Image: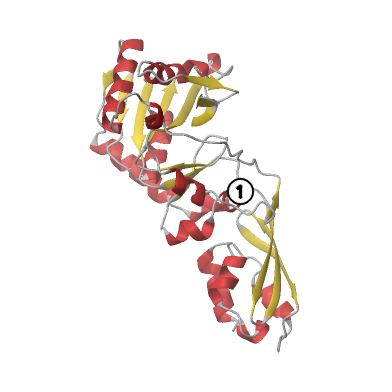
Amino acid sequence: MLSIFSPSNYAPFNIALEEYIFTNFKQDCFLLYINEPCIIVGRFQNTLAEINYQWVQEHEIPVVRRLTGGGTVFHDLGNLNFSFLMKNGKEETGGFAKYTAPILEAINDLGVPAILQGRNDLTIKGRKFSGNAKMVQDGKTLQHGTILFDSNVDSLSEALKVNPLKFTDKAVKSVRARVTNVSDHLPAPMKIKDFVDLVQTKIQLLYPDAKDYALSIDDREYVQALVSGKYESWDWNYGKSPQYNLANVIRSKAGTIELYLDVSSGVITNLRIFGDFFSSRDISELEEAFSGVPHTRENVREILQENDFRSFFGEVDLQDLVNGML
């Protein structure tokens, strides 16, 4: 087994690194990484329905879709992420216990009563500190999870605060749970760096053949190509969302504006606008202008400005309209 600690805190790099290892390495691998603040979305989720988009944009938080299913999670520098990338995929389809066991052992050794609860959550006294996801493909297993060690739970809450009535779709929905940090249960203070060392030591004991591996220049170049071509792209992170509908209401000086969007593969296919505002133009002109437009903040803003949005609505703030359509 190769034991790898990522040299990067950039989420698109680390999610790309998982794909690179899974696709190209013939050895079993154990990967640890820590991301700067970011949101990681499950493979089959509607990204916009999982995040507080306005908050994410204001704080310039990267949003990245991963390869595995499951729910959306918030990462920051107090959150340690682990991945097992193993060759024996056909034997590992039954559950999450095997590859969460080393993490539980490491935390239990610190005197903290952590357990696997339900299908894929690790908890302490009923509160979740780790969610886990899995993919089995071509005889290989990718199982990875988060560890809230000393994370900013308030930021987590804000990043994932979504209006449940805004979106209608058939995408997999995240189930929010009460969360906790491992550090809150430790008998003595501990830095995340020391916790990383403890986890790596536990892996060495359980997998005696484990050897440290540093990424080569070729490795980094390959990963960077994945970052640029896939994991930084709107098409992968937002455009791969299942078909969905968005409904929202804006209250402005011009009156109430109701917005209803149909979106498929990240592209607006239909827009309907209703309300008690007074318009000097046929509102269908603006509705038609959005047909085939990617459902992004930049494109929505551009179309509204190009079509002189105030001539349709009167006194309304551009930012309010943009937020209302996302």
Residue 282: percent from left, percent from top: 74, 84
Instruction: Say which residue appears at 49% left-offset and 15% top-offset.
Output: 98
**Quadrant in which residue 294 is drawn:** bottom right
Q: Position of residue 77 (x, y in %)?
A: 34, 41
Q: Which of 195 and 322 is in front in this view?
A: 195
Which of 153 and 7 lies nearest the eye of the viewer?
153
Near-viewer residue (268 or 146): 146
Up-down relation of residue 54 to residue 31 (above or below): below
Secondary structure of residue under mark 1: loop
Confirm whether residue 229 shows in the render.
yes
Instruction: Identify the amino acid type marked 1.
Output: Asn
Q: Position of residue 31 (x, y in %)?
A: 36, 28
Quarter holding the N terminus is top left
Graded by Cα atoms within 10 Å as few (under 14), some (14 to 19) or many (20 or more), the crowding at tag 1 reads: many
Among the 4 quarters of the image, the one containing residue 22: top left
Q: Is residue 288 left or right of residue 204?
A: right
Q: How many labels does the image show?
A: 1
Task: Please name the residue shown 58% across and 48% down the image.
Answer: 50
On screen, 10 above or below 208? below
- What residue is disc 1 on? 46
Q: In this view of the protein, can residue 133 be seen by the observer?
A: no
Closest to the observer, 194 or 96? 194
Q: Is residue 243 left or right of residue 24?
A: right
Q: Where is residue 230 in the image (x, y as percent from the top left)?
A: 45, 48
Report the residue that reaches farthest toward the front. Answer: 187
Look at the image and name its color scheme. Answer: secondary structure
